[in-house]
Image: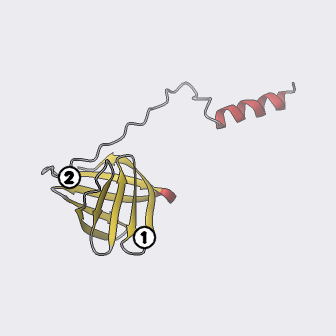
Amino acid sequence: MSIAAIGLAALSACTLGACTHGRQTASWTPIARPSPDDLVPMGIAYICEGRKEVAVVYAKNRASVTFGDKTWRTEYRPTGGSDFRYADTSVEWLGRDDLAALRETGTARPLAFNCRPARRTT
C-alpha cells in the first residue's frame, strides 16, 4: 500500500468519526422541557436546521418563543401524549423534548425545523 493510500485511509477514518485526536467524545444529554404547569420560568435555546436559533422561555402553561426579531407568547395545548404543542393565532411550537419545530398556524409552513435543545438560557 502506498503512502498516499495510507494517508487517504486515515483521513477517511477520521472523517467518519473514528479519530478523536486524543480527545474524549462528549455524549449528548437532552435538556428536559419543564412541565407545562411549572411556575418557575426556564429558558432553552434550540439550534435548528440551517443553524437557525429559536429561544423559548417556558412558564405556567405558556411559552415565549423568539425567532429572529419576533417573539410570540404561546399557550400550552394538550396533545394527549409525550409530545408538546404551544400555539397562538399565528404560530405553533411543537415536538418532543429532543426535537421540535416552529411553524405557521393554519398553513403549517415551517419557520424553523429539526430544532434540538442546545443550552439553558435561564
Residue 104 in the image: state x and y as whole percent. Answer: 38, 72
Vertical comparison of 108 with 101: above or below? below
Residue 75 in the image: state x and y as whole percent. Answer: 22, 64
Tell me the residue at 42%/36% (across/down): 28
Q: Amino acid at mark 1?
A: Ala
Residue lying furthest front in this view?
80
Residue 59 in the image: state x and y as whole percent. Answer: 18, 55
Residue lying furthest left in this view?
39
Q: Amino acid at mark 2?
A: Pro
Closer to the chain start, of discs 1 and 2, is 2
Q: Quadrant of residue 3?
A: top right
User: In this orientation, which residue lies closer to the viewer: 86 or 118?
Assistant: 86
Q: Quadrant of residue 84?
A: bottom left
Marker disc for residue 36? 2
User: In this orientation, which residue lies closer to the viewer: 109 or 15?
Assistant: 109
Query: Would residue 49 appear left or right of 57 to someone viewing this image?
Result: right
